[in-house]
Image (cartoon, rainbow, N blue to C red):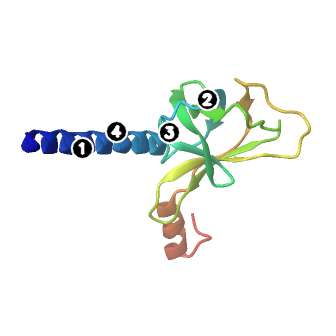
Amino acid sequence: MASHATEVITGGIVLAGAVGFFMYASQIAGFSGAGSSDVYSASFRSAEGISIGTDVRLAGVKVGTVTDMVLNPTTFRADASFSVQSDIPLPEDTAVIVASEGLLGGSFVELLPGGSPFNLEPGAEIEDTQSSISVVNLLMKFVSGGDEE
């Protein structure tokens, strides 16, 4: 009988550990489900390094994710849609930048809010964008002397 009780306790501990792991993983992945989000769009000349699921950050804090990315065949630009927590109002003159975490790090979408007293409506397109910078191209310019094309 003591063996049976030990097995039940061990199973309970393993089950509690698994539940804790899944809760932690869902928070890290952004599946917490807490709060609603608004969707915005932006068009980039180059969206190199970002894809669906990439973090959207404001002041270094994750506030959303990239939800869709397609190539616009008319403008030949990458049209991205991304969600932002609905409790974060974005001024009309907000800029969107594809930033890098470092020389070897990944990329993320950074929001730079402006000073406008008017806020963007959910679903609006953010016009002020800055595309990703290719580290390889920068290194090639540095090695070749910088001014030559």
According to the image, label 3 marks what residue? 30
Q: Amino acid at mark 1?
A: Val
Q: Is residue 93 above or below residue 37?
A: below
C-beta proximity under 8 Å, tags 1 and 3: no
C-beta proximity under 8 Å, tags 1 and 4: no
Q: Nearer the viewer, residue 6 or 111?
A: 6
Question: SS for tag 3?
Answer: loop
| Mark sitting earlier along the chain (4/2) | 4
Q: Amino acid at mark 2?
A: Thr
Q: Nearer the viewer, mark 4 or mark 3?
A: 4
According to the image, label 2 marks what residue? 75
Q: Amino acid at mark 4?
A: Val
| Mark sitting earlier along the chain (2/1) | 1
| Mark sitting earlier along the chain (1/4) | 1
Q: Nearer the viewer, mark 3 or mark 2?
A: 3
Disc 1 from disc 4: Cα separation? 9 Å
Q: Nearer the viewer, residue 63 or 108?
A: 63
Disc 1 from disc 3: Cα separation? 24 Å
According to the image, label 1 marks what residue? 14
Disc 3 from disc 2: Cα separation? 32 Å
Disc 4 from disc 2: Cα separation? 47 Å
Q: Is residue 125 left or right of residue 31?
A: right
C-beta proximity under 8 Å, tags 3 and 2: no
According to the image, label 4 marks what residue? 19
Q: Amino acid at mark 3?
A: Gly
Spot occupied by residue 15 in the image (x, y as percentages of width and height): 27, 39
Question: SS for tag 2?
Answer: loop
Quick one: label 4, few (<14), some, or many (20+) residues within 10 Å? few
Disc 2 from disc 1: Cα separation? 54 Å
Q: Quarter-wise, where is residue 55 in the image?
A: top right
| Mark sitting earlier along the chain (1/3) | 1
Spot occupied by residue 114 in the image (x, y as percentages of width and height): 83, 46
